[in-house]
Amino acid sequence: MNNHNKLLFRLPGADGLKTGYYRETGFNVVATAVKNDLRFIVVVLGSPKARTRDDVALEKFKKAFAQYKTVSVVKKGEEVNKEVILAEAKIGKVKGVAGADFLYPIPNDQKDTFKKEPVLAEKVKGEIKQGQKLGELVIKLDNQVVGKVDVVSPVNIPKANFFTILIRKLGINI
């Protein structure tokens, strides 16, 4: 079968999506492509020829990939600089880590001035499992929220014994 999406052969990283022709609208394409962790979707509607449709889509992809970059804002396992109090665990507090990577596209000429604000539970009770969610890391760009990443426990922390819990309730941190 002949593939009508010629962008798959003309553009490295092109991986789909749908071509079409309707008498009332002409030649159309919805195309996707990936380059350097950056994905774009281009839609071209109402072209008089399939070749023209493909040329317009190809030009849009080239322009978009030239104007944007992907910034790694958070890396999985990155330590969050805020502690969570563990009311009933063997140790009294722990610093969580990012549960996933967070990448974000920005224009090449824009500074990557991201702010990472941890929003964590004040106290967590009981045993802590590795990977257990402790809160979120809110990611902002120009004071606008652009994403969130779970903050998780980096290790298993068993529940403290009765004596340790009692001493902590009396206000003595151990």
Image (tube, helix red, strand yellow):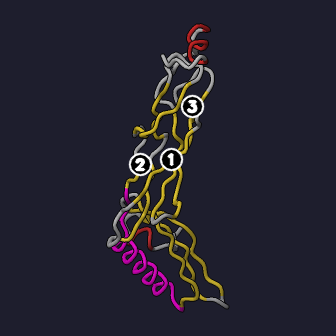
In the image, is residue 92 above or below residue 95?
A: above
The verdict on residue 163 being magenta is no
N-term-proximal mark, 3 vs 1: 3
In the image, is residue 18 above or below residue 77?
A: below
Q: Amino acid at mark 2?
A: Val
Residue at x 51% of width, y 39% of height: 151
What is the total number of numbered labels drawn onto the structure image? 3
Q: In this figure, which residue is indicated by the disc labeled 1?
A: 137
Q: Nearer the viewer, mark 2 or mark 1?
A: 1
Q: Classify mark 2: residues with Cα within 10 Å, few (<14), some (14-19) or many (20+).
A: many
Disc assigned to residue 127: none
Q: Amino acid at mark 3?
A: Gln
Disc assigned to residue 74: 2
For this rendering, which residue is in front, 163 or 160?
A: 163
Q: State if disc 1 and disc 2 touch (CB < 8 Å).
A: yes
Residue at x 42% of width, y 64% of height: 105
State the extent of the magenta-drawn residues as a range. 48-71
Q: Residue 136 in the image: x percent, y percent?
A: 54, 44
Mark 2–mark 1 Cα distance, whole angstroms, equals 9 Å
Q: Residue 58 in the image: x percent, y percent?
A: 41, 78
